[in-house]
């Protein structure tokens, strides 16, 4: 690998990392969230989880980056 190839790989990985870091990890981006209810727990999630960061082991994203 030469310096040009290394820079190209770093640039590509930097772009990939930016896309992954832009994924909102909250209830609104979870596939189990339906308007105001969590499909996993069959209850409304805490308000700070709807828009804030969640620590839910069942959080599931659909994989569409936009």
Image (spheres, grey):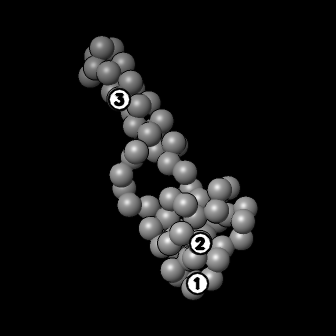
- Which of the marked residues, 3 or 1, is nearer the chain's N terminus? 3
Q: Is residue 8 above or below residue 31?
A: above
Q: Work out which residue is located at the far front of the displayed protein and give it.
A: 35
Image location of residue 13, percent across then percent down: 39, 33
Q: Which mark is residue 52?
A: none
Residue 20 visible in image: yes
Asked if disc 3 and disc 1 are in contact, CB closer than 8 Å, the reply is no
Name which residue lies at 62% across and 82% down: 43
Could you tell me which secondary element the residue under label 2 belongs to? loop
Image location of residue 5, percent across then percent down: 28, 20
Please state which of the two labelled residues, at mark 1 or mark 2, is closer to the viewer: 2
Lateral position of residue 5 relative to residue 46, left or right: left
Q: Which residue is mark 3?
A: 12
Image location of residue 50, percent across then percent down: 64, 62
Q: Which mark is residue 36?
A: 2
Mark 3 surroundings within 10 Å by alpha-carbon count, few (fewer than 14), some (14 through 19), many (20 or more) = few
User: Rounded to the nearest whole Å, what is the CA distance between mark 1 and mark 2?
Assistant: 12 Å
Q: Which mark is residue 41?
A: 1
Name the quarter where the N terminus is drawn: top left
Residue 6 visible in image: no
Q: Is residue 16 above or below residue 56?
A: above
Asked if disc 3 and disc 2 are in contact, CB closer than 8 Å, the reply is no
């Amino acid at each position: 690998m030469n310096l040009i190839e290394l820079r190209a790989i770093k640039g590509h990985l930097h772009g990939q990392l930016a896309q992954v870091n832009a994924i909102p990890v909250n209830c609104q981006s979870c596939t189990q969230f339906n308007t105001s209810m969590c499909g996993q727990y069959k209850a409304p999630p805490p308000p700070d989880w709807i828009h804030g960061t969640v620590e839910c082991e069942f959080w599931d994203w659909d994989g569409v980056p936009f």
